[in-house]
Image: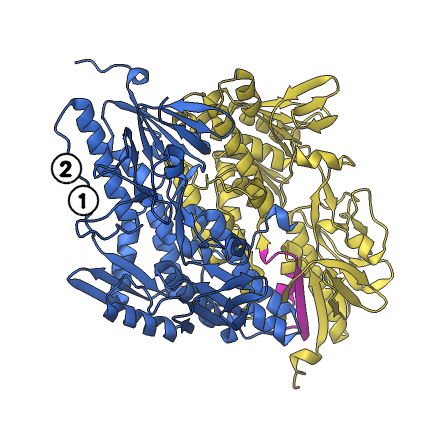
Chain colours: A blue, B yellow
Amino acid sequence: MNKPPISDRHHVVVVGGGFGGLQCIKSLKSANVRITLIDQRNHHLFQPLLYQAATTILAPSEIAWPLRHLFRDRADVTTIMAQVVGVETGACRVYLAGGESVAYDTLVLATGARHSYFGNDGWEAHAPGLKTLEDATAIRRKILSAFEIAEKSDDPEVQRQHMTFVIIGAGPTGVELAGIIAELAHRILPREFRKIDTRNARVLLVEAGPKLLSAYPDTLSAYAKAAVSKLGVEIMLDQPVTRCHADGIDMGGDRIPCKTVIWAAGVQASAAAEWIDVDCDRVGRALVNPDLTAAEHLNVFVIGDTAAVTDKSGNPVPGIAPAAKQMGRYVATVIRQRLMGLTLPGPFRYRHAGSLATLGRRAAIADFGRLKMKGPIAWWVWGIAHIFFLIGARSRIAVAWSWFWSFVTGQNSARIITVTEKDH
Amino acid sequence: MNKPPISDRHHVVVVGGGFGGLQCIKSLKSANVRITLIDQRNHHLFQPLLYQAATTILAPSEIAWPLRHLFRDRADVTTIMAQVVGVETGACRVYLAGGESVAYDTLVLATGARHSYFGNDGWEAHAPGLKTLEDATAIRRKILSAFEIAEKSDDPEVQRQHMTFVIIGAGPTGVELAGIIAELAHRILPREFRKIDTRNARVLLVEAGPKLLSAYPDTLSAYAKAAVSKLGVEIMLDQPVTRCHADGIDMGGDRIPCKTVIWAAGVQASAAAEWIDVDCDRVGRALVNPDLTAAEHLNVFVIGDTAAVTDKSGNPVPGIAPAAKQMGRYVATVIRQRLMGLTLPGPFRYRHAGSLATLGRRAAIADFGRLKMKGPIAWWVWGIAHIFFLIGARSRIAVAWSWFWSFVTGQNSARIITVTEKDH
C-alpha cells in the first residue's frame, strides 16, 4: 500500500514542546500522520534541573534543546515558533499571535503551567517564580547581585536585607533551591568576599503547611528537614505569607526584611481550558474525559500539567515529567488506533514510578513506593536518573561534567551576571 | 622586615576587569600593595571568542569568569561591582554610581572600548555591535529568530528580508561573524526547516575600504576573501554605508532590505580620558606619556583600548588582548619599582606577537611577521592558542569539548533563544 504524500495526511497539531508534547510526537513516529509542533519558545526545557540553572550549577544551554533540532530527521514534523492565542473547535483551527492560523484534524494541547500567586499578581515583581530559562537567569542575577550590593555597602541594615534569602513554598522546587543557595552562601562564596562574611547570610524556607515535601512519607520528609537545616536553611512551617513587597515579606504581623524572595508555592495551568471553553479545576486545569479528550471535542486532547487527571485511587496525577510523558504516549496510541480503525485502548491510567528530590549537592531522598532511600545514595540515584533522561549525548556529558567538576572542586561554573536591557 | 597590615598598604585602584586590568593585578602579586578592582560587570570576558557566543558555538559561561572568583586566593585584592562615573584627580578619588567613592594612591584605568557609529548613534538600534555577553545573546537571538520568522511567513518578500544578514565592517570580527553565520545557514540549519531553504540565506559582508582585514598582508587578505566567499559570504568592498534603518541599510542610492544587521565597523574608547580631563585622539583614547601615565597625573595610568599608544615605528598599538596585557604588566612593574625606590623601566614598548583570524570553523589565517600561515593548519594554531589563553582548566576543557563536538557532528550547541523582559 502506498502512503499518501505527507501534505495529504491526517494533520496532528501539538501545542507545547514540553515533556508531554514531545513524547506524543516521538510516539507518533511512522504513524501515517503529519505533525505541526507550535511553541512560543524555540527550545524544549528540562524543567527538573531548572533550579540548578537558577543557582549557578548548570548553564542554560545544558538543559535546553532547540525543538527543530530534535526533529530534524522527522520529515513528518514541522515546527513553528509562535504564540497561540486561541482555538476555534468548530472550524478546527488554532490561532496565532500575529493573525495567522493553522488548521488541524487532531489537536493536542500540552501547554503546561506557570507559577500562581493565588490572586495576588502584584507579588510577582517581588517574588519571581521559576518556570522558564529567563526566570532562572533572573533569579541567578538576583542572588549574585544581592551579595555584590552587600559587599559594596557600609550600612549593616542594607547588608542584612540583601543577605537574607526567602524561598516561599517547601515543595521539591523550594527545598532544592534553599539547599543550593545555602551551600552557595556557606561553602562556595566565603573566600571571595572581603567585607561581608557570606556565611552570615540567612536562607529561609517558608511554608504555609505543617511539613516539608508534603507528598513524601513522614520519614523522608523529616530526613529532608534535618538535612537542609544542616546546610544552614532556616525552616519556618505553618507560616502563610500574607504579603510580598519591595522590602520583604509579611506573615501576619511579622515582617522579614529581605531583598531576594523566590516563589515556589503554587502553579496555575495555562489558558488551554479557556481556549476550548471547557470546565477547569481551581488551578485552571481542563477537566478531561477518561481518554484525555476534552468535553465533546473528540479530536482535542489535553495532556500534562494543563489537564486535571486522577489516578485509579482518585488522587490527582502530579505535575511531573513522567506523568506528562505517559499522557503523551497514551494520546499517540489513541490517535494511531483511531486512524487504523482498531480497538481503542482503555482509559488513561497513570503509573507512579517514584519521587526524587535533592537536598544540596550531596544528598537526596527517593520514594519508589516500597523502596525508600535517603542521603548520598539517593543523590547518586537521582543524578544517574536525571542524566539518563537528558536528551542527547552532548548534554549528558556536559551535565555530568559540570556535576563532576562541582563535586571535586566545590565550585559552581555558571556564575555570570548578565543584565537585561531594562537594567541598562 | 615585617610587612604592614593590608589596610595600611599603598592602595592601587584598577578600574576595568578586562585583559589589561587583570594582567596588572596578576603582575602585582606579592607587591606590597592593596588592590581594589572596580568593574560594572561581575565577570571577565574573553572577548576574542565573543563572536562564537553570538553565533551559537559557545555558551556565555564558557568565555566568562566571575572576577572575584579569579582573585579568591589573593587577600590583597578587593573586588567591587559598580559603575564608575568620575575621577577627582586632585583628591585622588574615584566616584561610583550611587554616590559612594573610593580613594586611591595609584589609579589604573583599563576601561576598554565600545563600538562606535561615527556620530550616528541612532543606527545602534538597527545594527547592534558586539562587545558584551548581552550583545552576544542579543545578536544570537536576532539571527535565530530571523529564520523562525521566515519559516512562519508565507510572504516571499518577508522571507527574503529576514534571510538577509548584513555585517558591516570587514575587520577580524566582521569576517569571523560572516563566516560562521554563512556556515550556520548553509550547513547546519538546512535539515531543520520545512518551508524555507536556509541555503538561500544571503550573508553580506560590507566594507567601506578596498580590502578585507586591512591590517594583514595582501596575500593573507586575498586568501581570506576567497575562503569566506567559498563559505557563501557575499563581499562588498568600497561600499560605505550611509544609513542603517528598520528595513535595512543604504549605501548611497542603493538599499539592501534586511532585518539583521551587525555592526563591526568601529570602536570608541570609554570615557576614561574625560574622567581625568586629558586630551584624547579622535576615537576618544587618552593620550598618555611614554610610561602610560596621563598628562601631569603621575599616579594615574591609562592602559589597553582606552589609551592611545604608538609602537617604536610610530604606528598605533592595536586594540587586542596581548597589547592590553603588555601594558598591564608594564604598569605593574612601574608601580613596584616606584614603591621600592628602584630605577624605573624605560618607556613602554609594544611587541607584536602576531595576528590570527578564523574563517568559518575549519580555516584561519595567521601572521607572525616572517611566518605566515593559512587554512586548516592556521585554524589549529588559532584554536590551540585560544584554548591556552582561556582561564582555568574547566573552561579549557569545556571550550575544547564544544569545538570538538561541533567539528565531529557539524552541530553547534548553544542555539537557545532567550527573550528579554522587554519582549514579554
| Residue A86, quarter of picture | top left
Q: Nearer the viewer, residue A403 or A12?
A: A12
**Would residue B340 be found to the left or right of residue B157 on screen?**
right
Residue to which mark 2 is pinned: A346
Query: Tag 2, which secondary structure?
Result: loop
Residue to which mark 1 is pinned: A349
Q: Nearer the viewer, residue A118 or B243?
A: A118
Q: Nearer the viewer, residue B120 or B320?
A: B120
**Would residue B400 be found to the left or right of residue B99 on screen?**
left
Q: Are marks 1 and 2 on the same chain?
A: yes
- Asked if the residue under mark 2 is in contact with the one under mark 1, i.e. CB atoms within 8 Å, the reply is yes
Q: Which residues are magenta?
A: B23-43
Question: In the picture shown, does residue B326 fall above or below B378?
Answer: below
Question: In the picture shown, does residue A65 fall above or below B203?
Answer: below
Residue type at numbered disc 1: Arg
Q: Nearer the viewer, residue B205 or B103?
A: B103
Residue A19, position as x, y percentages in the image: 32, 42
Q: Residue at x 55, y 34 (%)?
A: B142
Residue A1, position as x, y percentages in the image: 16, 14
| Residue B168, quarter of picture | top right
| Residue A403, quarter of picture | bottom left
Q: Residue at x 28, y 38 (%)?
A: A23
Query: Tag 1, which secondary structure?
Result: loop
Residue A300, position as x, y percentages in the image: 30, 31
Question: In the picture shown, does residue B359 fall above or below A194?
Answer: above
Residue type at numbered disc 2: Gly
Dot 1: chain letter: A
Quick check: is B38 in the magenta stretch? yes
Q: Residue furthest bottom?
A: B1
Q: How many marks?
A: 2
